[in-house]
Image: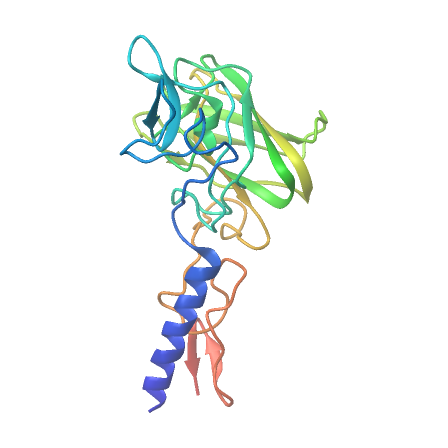
């Protein structure tokens, strides 16, 4: 009977975890459905003259490639965005950048898709995120790409100030489509905007995706070796790694490494 009770508690805890932390991302937008920058499906749903590309309505260029201004609003509010870990960028966030290469727009870095990058078009650049409301955070997580392999320096400032709230140097390996870098800690605080300035060394700057690290959705320990997971799949009790509980043990039992032991 005790085993059956444990299994029921495990399923309930797992369901609670999925509701709290989620996985993947879903499209939402501050733009009206059908308008440029608004959400759409592969079946259409865009205003005349626009095409649905990556679930976003975009204008059609002569080359047949969709285009958007170098800013945009994004979607994910889960405890994981594109498997990057941390908290998804708040819906309504606007991205802008120092510049971009071809269709590698600033909004690509917060669209929840790891394979759509922002590329600065040069060896350095900055990417700014303006949130719809102030966000409490303790760090950021970046997925990047580089050619050739580069030791890149990331400096984070906030709310228009030039004083860094965080900085780190990370190696971005060439030949890998997406390199998920170790989290970069920032001074814990609540910020209305952040700017990530990147010096790419011998490689053009390219960011595939950004995720925020918060006290509610941490990425393991904010630093080398973090796992980026919120998981109750192998735990019956204790912390899920995302600031929530996988469940509690019966009286007389002790939670040890995620298991309830008598």
Residue 153 image position (x, y, % from top left): 54, 26
Foreground: 137 or 69?
A: 69
Residue 243 is drawn in which quadrant? bottom right
Foreground: 17 or 94?
A: 94
In the figure, 235 relative to 150: above or below? below
In the figure, 88 relative to 246: above or below? above
Residue 48 is left or right of residue 218, and the answer is left
Foreground: 198 or 18?
A: 18
Residue at screen point 40% across, 78% down:
9
Residue 185 image position (x, y, % from top left): 59, 41
Colour style of the rendered protein structure: rainbow
In the figure, 155 relative to 19: above or below? above
Q: Residue furthest top?
A: 62
Residue 158 is left or right of residue 15, and the answer is right
Q: Residue furthest front?
A: 48
- The quadrant of the picture occupied by the N terminus is bottom left
Residue 116 image position (x, y, % from top left): 37, 28
Residue at screen point 49% across, 82% down:
254
- The quadrant of the picture occupied by the C terminus is bottom left
Residue 166 image position (x, y, % from top left): 63, 35
Foreground: 227 or 233?
A: 233
Residue at screen point 32% across, 85% down:
4
């Amino acid at each position: 009977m005790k085993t059956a009770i444990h299994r029921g508690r495990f399923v309930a805890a797992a369901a609670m975890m999925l509701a709290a932390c989620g996985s993947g991302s879903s499209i939402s937008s501050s733009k009206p459905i059908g308008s440029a920058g608004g959400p759409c499906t592969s079946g259409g749903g865009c205003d005349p003259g626009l095409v649905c590309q990556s679930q976003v309505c975009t204008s059609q260029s002569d080359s047949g490639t969709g285009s958007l201004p170098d800013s945009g609003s994004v979607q994910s509010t889960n405890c994981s965005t594109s498997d990057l870990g941390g908290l998804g960028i708040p819906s309504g966030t606007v991205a802008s950048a120092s510049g971009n290469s071809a269709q590698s727009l600033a909004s690509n870095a917060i669209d929840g898709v790891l394979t759509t990058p922002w590329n600065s078009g040069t060896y350095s650049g900055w990417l700014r995120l303006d949130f719809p409301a102030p966000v409490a955070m303790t760090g950021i997580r970046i997925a990047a790409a580089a050619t050739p392999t580069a030791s890149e320096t990331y400096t984070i400032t906030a709310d228009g100030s030039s004083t860094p709230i965080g900085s780190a140097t990370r190696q971005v390996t060439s030949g890998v489509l997406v390199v998920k870098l170790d989290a970069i800690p920032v001074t814990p605080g609540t910020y209305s905007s952040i700017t990530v300035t990147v010096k790419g060394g011998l490689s053009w700057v390219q960011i595939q995706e950004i995720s925020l690290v918060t006290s509610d959705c941490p990425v393991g320990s904010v630093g080398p070796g973090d796992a980026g997971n919120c998981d109750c799949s192998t735990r019956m009790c204790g912390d899920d790694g995302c600031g929530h509980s996988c469940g509690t043990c019966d009286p007389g039992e002790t939670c040890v490494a995620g298991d309830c032991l008598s």
